[in-house]
Each structure stands twice: as structure tokens, then as C-alpha cells.
Image: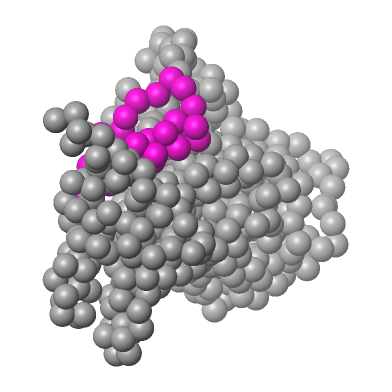
Amino acid sequence: MLAAAVSIGQDLRRNLLAGARLALFLPVRALNFRVSVAQYAVLVLASLACWLAGGMLRQGFPGHLDAAAFAVALAQVPLVLAGCFLAARLFREPQLALAFAVLLVATDPVFEAVGVAVQLAADFDAFAPYAGAVNWVFLAWSFAVLVRTQLVLTGWRGRRSVAALVLFALLLAGLIAYFPRTELWAPDEEDAEPGPSVLQEEIFHRQGMLLDEQLAALRPERPGITDLYFLGVAADGGQDTFYKELMSVRQLMEDRFDVAGRSIALVNNPATLKALPIASVSNLRTALEGLGRKIDVERDVVMLHITTHGSSDHRLYFDMPPLELEQLTPTALARMLSDSGIKWKVIVISACYAGGYIEPLKDDNTLIITASDATHTSFGCSADSDFTWFSEAYYDDALRETRSFTEAFEMAKETVAEREQSEGYAPSNPQMFLGRAMRAKLAELERRLDRGPVPDSGLRNSPIRLEKK
């Protein structure tokens, strides 16, 4: 028994050394490997151990084994074996199936070690511009190792070699697309003191007044001036990303688009419960109705920005535990906008599947911009992000260079597409609809903004009118 364990250990050492030489394109032959079912099994365990250790270095301590990620990792094993079996059939040599599997898994520790080094380098700002290129280098390296593995085992055999390379390329693409690499090691969430709750009596009663205060504080529309009003909604209170994004977007709009004193924010976040009204469907309806009474609906423009998660059935996620909030649908939003009486509208929705809102909302007097089409997800809403990808490209980049909402969309669409491609994500396909009459209205607004902000001298906040114009 001891002798067998020693033999397995020695063969494992030889396979790992030969795998390193294979991955690093150093001289190696097929005879340098020890091919057996036992060796394949221990190599898989060694690969998982290296993966777990790399995750520990990247994620830190304390932490725990992520059972779901571990299950996904194990699910890849039969897929790789099936690919190796088909490749062996192409060469009409059944014994090659196990040989392919052993050689490929023997290279895993080298890839993991390089991945850890790249992750450590990514902590330096100087590395950031090269992150996308590094991903492509990794993909090219992986395919090159597949090619070399085949050449080491079989040499070049014309059409059969070409067919096997195509098979391995499809296998690699399938694993990347459907089994994206996730960490086996997940950091433990730090214990935190319980934050404010909307059910606390003081906060509960305060919430009833916050939206009224924001509406009452809006500066009045200025006769003869096309004013822009901003209504921002950060609807998911489960993470800070949407709140941070909305605060940045609101500040940009005040700095560059003359909406200071003409903006409202609805936010679901524990940190803002005492200062800002929560983002609920009913508060959104009230805010739109209040704006409809405040503005000159025939002249002024209202910009609505909503940032949250979206579902494939085109519901926008409104969440502020422990409240059970109604979710927003395209039909409900279309009804709110119609009831508000607001004529000129710029609507930006940063959420997955947001393109499903275009058809129900579009008309001649509306610009609609969505972070994705109706059938795809958008990206960048991880807990440590300050912006979703589309909003960062649209607001933080493009709208700092131009005051044209449509030009900014084209710039942002290109930026997002390049980022998704460089990081290996499926395209989100941001969408835009521009109403015929809205085109001229936006040109008028842009010319007015380019001349600089209009002073509010002599104007005071007026109460919200009870009747629409």
C-alpha cells in the first residue's frame, strides 16, 4: 500500500514537471508523462487544490469553500473527458483519450500560478490599461497549449489534426462561455452593526415628508427658457453601486446641465433613509406628477435616470428590506409618464434587459436610452463598483465631453462594446430611440446649455401648482 502511494506520488511529480514544460513551451516528449486513470484522478485533485490555493491568495482570509463554484468546477471534468474521447476517435486511437486528458490537466498549476501573479499586479494602477489585453493573451496561450499538446501526442496528421484542433477550440470556447471561471474560495462577509431601518419610528415618519420637501424645494421654471429637470432613481437597496452611481450622475447633471435646484433623487439605501425618499413605484409616480405640475410642460424637459437590476421579463427591481416593494414594469412606467402630463422626456435605464422598455415608452417627444437590449444583460453592478459599465461610459466619460445626449450614447456604446469584448463578455447591445420632434428639442436645449447656465435672479421657489398646464 505504501509502495503504491509512493509510486503515485512520484508519477504525479513527473507529470506536474512535464506539464509545466508543456505549458511553458520547453522541450518535452510524450514519454515524459505517466498516463493512467489513477494519475488523471490525482492530477484533477492537484488542479483543484491549486485553484483553491490561488483563490485564497486572491480573496484573502477569513473565507470558505464555495460549494456552488466547486460543483461548477467538477462539472467541467466530464466535458473535458468527452472532448478528449472525441479527439481520440478522430485519430482512431482510443488510448489517446486518457493521454489528452492527463497532459491537459497537468498544465493547470502553471496557469494558476501565472493567474495569481497577474491578479497581484492588477492591484497597481499602472496595470489597469493592460487588463483587457492580458485576458486575450491568456486565451491565446490556452489555445497554443492545446495545439502543442496535440502535436506532442500525435504529431501532425493533416485533416485529422485540423479536425481535432477545431474540436479543442470549440471545447475551450464552450467552457469560457458556459462555465466562466469562478473562485473556489469566497471571503467571509464582515460582521457589521445593524444600520438604520425604514421601520424605525423616526425614519418611518420622516419618509412621509422627504419627497414633499424635495418637490417643494424645486426651483420654478423660467419663462422663455427651456429648463432641464432631473429625476434619478437608485432602486436596489441591496448594494451601494446604484446609490453611488446616482449621486455621481446627479452631480454631473448639476455641474454641466444646469439642473442645480431642479433635481430629485429617490434612493433605496440604508445610509440615505433620513435624508432622501425611498425609491418605490408609488414615490416615482408622485415625483413625476409633481414635476408635471411644477414645470412648463410645453417647453421644459425632464430627464429620468433609473439604475437597478432588471429581469428577463422586463421588470425593474425595487428593493428596500424589510419593505416588500412593487416592481416596475414598462406598462406601469408608460402610464405614469402619460398621467404626469410631461411632454418632453429623456429616459435612461441602466439595467439588464432594459431594451424591453423602448416600445412601450417611445413617442415623438421622447429620447430613450437603455444599457442593454431586451434580451441581454448589462454589466458592472458588482458590489464594489461605483458605476455600472454603461452609466460610467455614458455619464462619467461621454457627457463630460459633450452636451449632446445622442452623441454621448454613440460614444458610450462603442466604449462598452470594446470593454465587453476585451473582458470576454457577451455584448449587451445598448439601445437608443429618438422621437422625431425630440431631435429638434434636444438641439435647442444643447444650444442653450452651450451658452452657459441661466441665472435665477429674482425668482423664488414657488409652490407646486395643483393643476397641470
Image: 143 above or below 166: above
Most frequent secondary structure within the magenta stretch: helix
Tell whether 86 sits left or right of 388.
Answer: left
Viewport quadrant of the N terminus: top left
In which image quadrant can residue 223 be found? bottom right
What x and y, as percent, mark residue 294? 59, 45
What x and y, as percent, mark residue 241? 52, 38
Residue at 32% over, 22% down: 322
Hey, which residue is sitting farthest bottom in the picture? 159
In which image quadrant can residue 335 be found? bottom left
Residue at 54% over, 53% down: 389
Residue at 58% over, 28% down: 213
What x and y, as percent, mark residue 9? 29, 38
In which image quadrant can residue 387 be found? top right
Q: Nearer the viewer, residue 47 or 331?
A: 47
Residue at 52% over, 42% down: 116
Find out whether residue 331 is within the magenta segment: no
Res 25 seen here? yes
Q: Which residues are magenta?
A: 47-76
Q: Nearer the viewer, residue 153 or 289?
A: 153
Tell whether 86 sits left or right of 452.
Answer: left
Image: 460 above or below 367: above
Find out whether residue 69 is within the magenta segment: yes
Tell whether 458 sits left or right of 190.
Answer: right
Hey, which residue is sitting farthest front in the picture? 3
Q: Nearer the viewer, residue 404 or 170?
A: 170
Viewport quadrant of the C terminus: bottom right
What x and y, as percent, mark residue 403? 73, 63
Q: Nearer the viewer, residue 386 or 328?
A: 386
